[in-house]
Amino acid sequence: MPAQAAQVEVHVPFSFTVNSETLPPGDYRVSSDAGDGVLFVRGFTGGAFAVTNRVDSSTETDAKLVFNKYGDQYVLREAWMGDGSARELPESSFERGLKEKARNDEAAPGSEQVSIPAL
């Protein structure tokens, strides 16, 4: 019997990047099959997917998306599915470029983490 797909719905109030795909603000359905490492992010105007690593936690039970923020750029890093498991996205070349820019530009703000709870 195939494993159930984990799924969360979330409203993201800002544009964000998944791998190299920039998605607009809006409502998204984020899902991942338990058996594979692919995370799907689907909205009304588009979507993206990413190969991820599974993370398990006995203390984290809230469904949410976690973004790294660099200035006004947001990069999706984790999708917590509400069952103590998450999908962690590897650092993309886009995010490495943002980190490098922040390191080289003293006026640029550093990074911070932003969490958006599921609906």
Image: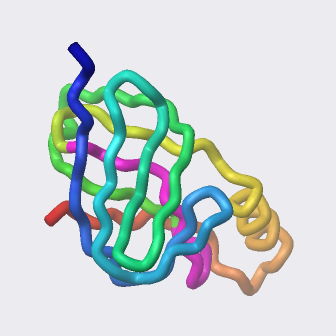
Q: Position of residue 64 (x, y in %)?
A: 26, 55
Q: How far across and down, in percent of the image, does residue 41 sit?
A: 41, 58
Q: Which residues are magenta?
A: 69-81
Q: Is residue 6 magenta?
A: no
Q: Is residue 59 left or right of residue 14?
A: left
Query: Magenta region's main secondary structure?
Result: strand
Question: Percent from the top left, x then y, of residue 113?
Answer: 44, 62
Nearer to us in this view, 81 or 110: 81
Above or below, 5 against 92 in this view is above
The residue at the point 72 percent across, 68 percent down is 98
Inspect the magenta stretch and tell me whether residue 75 lies in it: yes
Q: Quadrant of residue 119?
A: bottom left
Location of residue 77 with respect to 69 vertically, above or below: above
Residue 50 position (above or below residue 102): above
Residue at point 78%, 79% (across, down): 106
- The residue at the point 63 percent across, 71 percent down is 110
Give above or below for 60 relative to 100. above
